[in-house]
Every structure is written in structure tokens, then in C-alpha cells.
Amino acid sequence: MVSNNYETVFILTPVLSDAQMKDTVDKFRKVLTDNGAELVHEDNMGLRKLAYPIQHKNTGYYQLFEFKAPGTIIDKLNTEYLRDERIIRHLTISLDKHAQAYNEKKRNGQVGKKKQTENA
């Protein structure tokens, strides 16, 4: 079975307690791993301001998973997102080789940092 690389981001409603937020993230991690996904990277981006109100909320908890999995997992994952009322938005994308290389550089700290000039 062919595995593709994917990245999924979801936004949790800000009214959750830390324990409820952790349980929700664990639930979706389990959905991925139970369906044959290999987690490559996970990033809890925390509470952030939304660009526009969603369900009368101005903030939300952002969570990102980067994973390798067969394409059949995406429908199952989307179904779980839609069934869970704690999720206010979600997006799953397929990563090409350039996006994978960029994410690898970002994890290694080679992207997003300003070059320091040496003043001796």
C-alpha cells in the first residue's frame, strides 16, 4: 500500500479545559495511529487569535499533525473531525517533496530565523 505524506491542522474550541483539550488531541492521535498512520511531527501551537470569528469564538487551540499514511485514512479522519463538536475548523493537505523538505528544515531550525551578522 502506498503511503503519502499529509499534514492536518485542527482548531479546538477555546472553552475546553486543559484536560479536555489533551483528551481531544489524544483521540485524534489515536485515530491516526489506529488506521496505520506513522506520525512524523506533532506541534501544539496553543491558544491563538482567529482571523475571523468562528461559532462566535475569537480564539482557538491549534494542533498540527504531520504523518505518513495511505490515502484511505483521510476520509475516516474527516468524518471524525465532523462528528466531534469540540473541533471548530480542520484542514488536511497532502505534502509534496518540496513541502516535506521545507518542514524538515523548519524542524531543524534552518527556516524562520534571521541570519546573524558577525560584529567582532
Image (cartoon, rainbow, N blue to C red):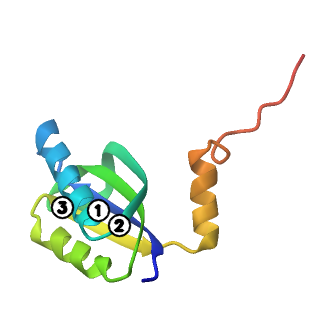
Q: Amino acid at mark 1?
A: Thr
Q: Amino acid at mark 2?
A: Ala
Q: Residue furthest top?
A: 120
**3D distance between C-alphas at marks 3 and 1:** 19 Å
Is 55 on the left or on the right of 3, as rendered? left
**3D distance between C-alphas at marks 2 and 1:** 5 Å
Disc sitting over residue 20 in the figure: none
* Viewer-side label of 2, 3: 2
At a point 35% along the width and 67% down the height, the residue shown is 37
- Residue 92 location, x and y as percent? 36, 71
* 47 to 104, vertically: above or below: above
Q: Which residue is mark 3?
A: 87
Is 56 on the left or on the right of 114, as rendered? left
- Residue 70 location, x and y as percent? 38, 78
Q: Which residue is mark 2?
A: 37
Considering only order in the chain, which callout, 3 or 2, is on the residue closer to the N terminus? 2
* Viewer-side label of 3, 1: 1
Q: Amino acid at mark 3?
A: Ile
* 4 to 34, vertically: above or below: below
Residue closest to the eye, 2 or 29: 2
At a point 31% along the width and 51% down the height, the residue shown is 62
Q: Residues within 10 Å of mark 2 (few under 14, many from 20)?
A: many
What secondary structure is found at the residue carrying circle 1? helix
Q: Which residue is mark 1?
A: 33
Considering only order in the chain, which callout, 1 or 3, is on the residue closer to the N terminus? 1
Which quadrant would residue 76 be assigned to in this image?
bottom left
- Residue 25 location, x and y as percent? 23, 51
- Residue 75 location, x and y as percent? 26, 81
Q: Residue furthest right?
A: 120
Q: Is residue 7 shown to the viewer in this render?
A: yes
Q: Residues within 10 Å of mark 1 (few under 14, many from 20)?
A: few
